[in-house]
């Protein structure tokens, strides 16, 4: 499932603090919460809090990767995405990435991705994530974390649990976004990607504004200006030999998940998310 896109938590420490003495006396309380509450700045849930919440799986499968930007990295990363769904109007605070990083030592003839796949089989959390189906209701227990003080928030399930509860009775609805250019990838990461990480968004009546690159990444907008950055990572795994639409193609709509990877991109889940 591609070592070329996707990286998340690299924290392999235990859930209690690093002081051996305090670990014996301090127990972190698990706080019941919701995805919207997790994404509320200044809300009751803080980074490093242990939390428990439910959401509906929107990612098409568990993403298994390693950090190919850092040749010295010895971590395998695994992630899924869940969204809030209660029948109310969807918002850009309705999604969150659930991840775990497992430390390893890459060696031998097997590919790094293959080694990560084998390592994941030894983790209860990874196997639970891998066994889920898109649309399942999932109960998560883990730790709220973030990339920096104001970076993308995510849930690290190292030491936590991921429990599938069958098909959710109510499925998440994509958030319609009138201006795709708010999701134009850049460095530093635009705030829109931080605020909406893990959310399913939809652009209507758009055109492809940049020719696809080697990874079949491209941009879309309502005008002929650059616009939102689109990743074909999920689609390329599910559709062998997939080729993205060429520059100038008009699309009725495009739906995808917001990720902050590599400057920020929208990931359609399958070819069905791209309507010609």
Image (cartoon, helix red, strand yellow):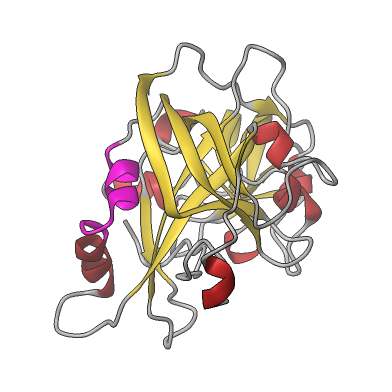
At a point 54% along the width and 67% down the height, the residue shown is 23
What is the quadrant of residue 200 in the picture? top right
Q: Tell me if residue 207 is in the magenta stretch.
A: no
Where is residue 207? Give x, y as percent: 65, 38
Answer yes or no: is residue 135 visible: yes
Q: Tell me if residue 126 is in the magenta stretch.
A: yes
Q: Depth check: give the residue in front, 163 or 244.
A: 163
What is the quadrant of residue 129 in the picture? top left
Where is residue 185? Give x, y as percent: 69, 58
Residue 62 higher or lower than 215, as above or below: above
At a point 72% along the width and 64% down the height, the residue shown is 186
Where is residue 83? Give x, y as percent: 57, 31
Which image quarter is the N terminus in? bottom left
At a point 70% along the width and 55% down the height, the residue shown is 47
Residue 123 higher or lower than 195, as above or below: below
Question: Viewed as shown, does residue 176 lie left or right of 240?
Answer: right
> In the image, which residues are magenta?
120-131
**Magenta stretch mostly in which secondary structure?**
helix
């Amino acid at each position: 499932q591609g070592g070329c896109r996707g990286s998340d938590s690299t924290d392999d420490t235990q859930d209690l603090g690093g002081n051996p003495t305090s670990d014996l006396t301090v127990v972190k309380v698990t706080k019941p919460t919701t995805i919207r509450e997790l994404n509320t700045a200044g809300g009751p849930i803080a980074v490093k809090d242990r939390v428990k919440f439910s959401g509906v799986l929107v990612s098409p499968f568990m993403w298994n990767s390693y950090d190919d930007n850092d040749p010295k990295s010895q971590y395998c990363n695994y992630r899924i995405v869940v969204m809030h769904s209660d029948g109310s109007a969807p918002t850009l605070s309705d999604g969150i990435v659930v991840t775990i990083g497992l430390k390893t030592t890459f060696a031998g003839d097997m590919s790094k991705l293959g080694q990560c796949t084998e390592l994941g089989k030894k983790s209860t959390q990874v196997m639970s994530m891998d066994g889920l189906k898109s649309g399942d209701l999932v109960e998560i227990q883990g730790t709220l974390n973030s990339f920096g003080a104001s970076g993308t928030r995510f849930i690290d399930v190292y030491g936590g649990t991921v429990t599938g509860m069958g098909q959710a009775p109510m499925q998440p609805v994509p958030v319609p976004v009138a201006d795709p250019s708010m999701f134009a990838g850049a460095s530093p990461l635009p705030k829109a990607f931080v605020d909406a990480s893990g959310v399913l968004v939809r652009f209507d009546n758009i055109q492809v504004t940049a020719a696809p690159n080697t990874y079949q990444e491209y941009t879309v907008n309502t005008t002929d200006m650059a616009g939102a950055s689109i990743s074909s990572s999920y689609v390329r795994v599910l559709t062998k030999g997939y080729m993205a639409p060429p520059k100038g193609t008009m699309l009725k709509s495009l739906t995808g998940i917001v990720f902050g990877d590599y400057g920020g991109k929208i990931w359609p889940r399958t070819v069905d998310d791209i309507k010609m």
